[in-house]
Amino acid sequence: MKIKMRNNNILDKTKGCLVGLACGDYLGMPYEFILPYKVRSYFQSHKLEPVETQIFNKSVTGYYTDDTSLAICLAESLIEKGFDTRDQFTKYKMWLREGYATPYGDRAYGVGQQTLKFLTRQSEDNLPTELVNDPKAGGNGALMRCAPIGLLYYKDPKKLIEYSLRSAIVTHNNTIAAWSCVALNSFISYALEGFFKNDYCSALLAEIPDIPTELHNLLNTNLHEINEDELKIRGYSLDTLKVALYAFLTTDTFEDCLTRAIAVGGDTDTQGAVAGALAGAYYGCEVIPKSWRNTLIRHDFIVDLAERLYNSEDLVTKVLYIINGSNRKMPAHFMSNGNRTQSFCVDFDISETDEYEMASKAWRSSTDQSVIKIGEDIMLATFIAVKLDGEEFIPKLYQSITETYPEELFNKHKDYFEHCADFGKLRAKSS
């Protein structure tokens, strides 16, 4: 059972996760093609620091690779569309073909073979929806990009698991590749919720006792007793997760964690990205060395992206809290549904007359109390969405609310619910 033990600044940790991922990516990239024993030897006498590297015949520092670019694509898709694998895949293809989400917006760098295969051969119209365990698709290409799902759905383990799997298999339809994403995102959720890191493995085993055997064995391994020379440093998803978890659990600072993940050699940029995402979510952004952050190309954009992701989740939480939870004492003429409407209107400075008009319009439209509740939820949610963040957020809120109710009931009263959404939107614009 997980026990909350640490205080948290969730926004700082959200920033830390994405900035940590990008820093681990760019700091690890120069060592990727060097023989592992030479990397280990180098770090016996050198600190990890930004260095110049050659990219497309240019000397650059702070240049992130496919790990960060694809994580950006996923984060932007989640913000704009909610969970939508078609949109995720479309953005990945934009990255490959157009250089979308790259440091300079020009050319994709570092695409893995499995990702390349799917992005060039697979259509958005028939993306895989079931896990089939392709033995050739076990690489770490889904693991390196999956962290935004952990950040957005950290309060909802069921969605975190489902969405981690579904997002992974669009390019890596392999049991271990997909479940490695579940593990990493679960660890990120534990970091944001404030649990001690030494409890992560036991917490995940308790939460998902039937996790695939290879992952079960990893979670039962005492990583403090591992000899790093024995770590496998291929591009296999489980190996990368093991290196990242080893680096995270056997160090006490973000800087030491990232150094250890990269110093073992091998797939250093992805090991750095995965370890950086996890450590960043645990320690927060402010502790990442300034020299690392300031060197990162598009640092401000990535911080802003993290804020948008945080605010995206926070607005959903805020809306559902406002429309469902209030301890205010209400006037006698308000029924149970009206109580929620009344508290909402007080919070958003709406007069009682306007509030009563909104509630009455919903109640007159139906005599079914369950239908009234859904309609009112949608009406209030669209009002809040427009007030706080503009109309672009309405579809995501709408989806969050509708997923709560039976599909059959929702479809039967679709016209009424759309009317409620329109009314909430109009009220927001006129108040």
Image (cartoon, helix red, strand yellow):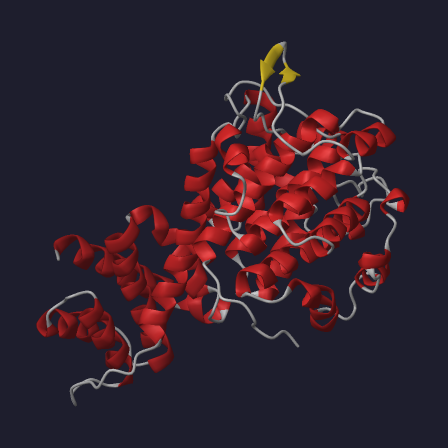
* Closest to the observer, 146 or 353: 146
Residue most extreme to the bottom: 332
In this rendering, position of residue 224 left or right of residue 81: right
Total numbered circles = 0
Q: Position of residue 238 (x, y in %)?
A: 80, 49
Tell me which corner region of the image, top left, top right, bottom left or bottom right, holds residue 207.
bottom right
Q: Residue at x 51, y 43 (%)?
A: 75
Can residue 127 be seen in the rendering of this structure? no
Name which quarter of the figure residue 333 lies in. bottom left
The C terminus: image quadrant: bottom left
Q: Nearer the viewer, residue 408 or 296?
A: 296
Q: Is residue 317 visible?
A: yes
On screen, 428 above or below 287?
Answer: below
Q: Residue 197 location, x and y as percent? A: 66, 62
Please, which residue is most extreme toward the top here?
Answer: 57
Residue most toward the right?
A: 230
Residue 348 appears at what percent x and percent y? 20, 65
Q: Position of residue 356 (x, y in %)?
A: 14, 75
**Residue in front for this viewpoint, 28 or 138:** 28
Left or right of 287: which side holds 137?
A: right
Q: Residue furthest front?
A: 45
Residue at the (70%, 25%) spot, across then down = 30
Residue at the location (87% across, 31% down)?
A: 37
State the residue at coordinates (60%, 28%): 50
- 337, above or below 219, in the image: below
Q: Is residue 17 above or below residue 125?
A: below
Indicate the quadrant containing the N terminus: top left, top right, bottom left or bottom right: bottom right
56 to 283, vertically: above or below: above
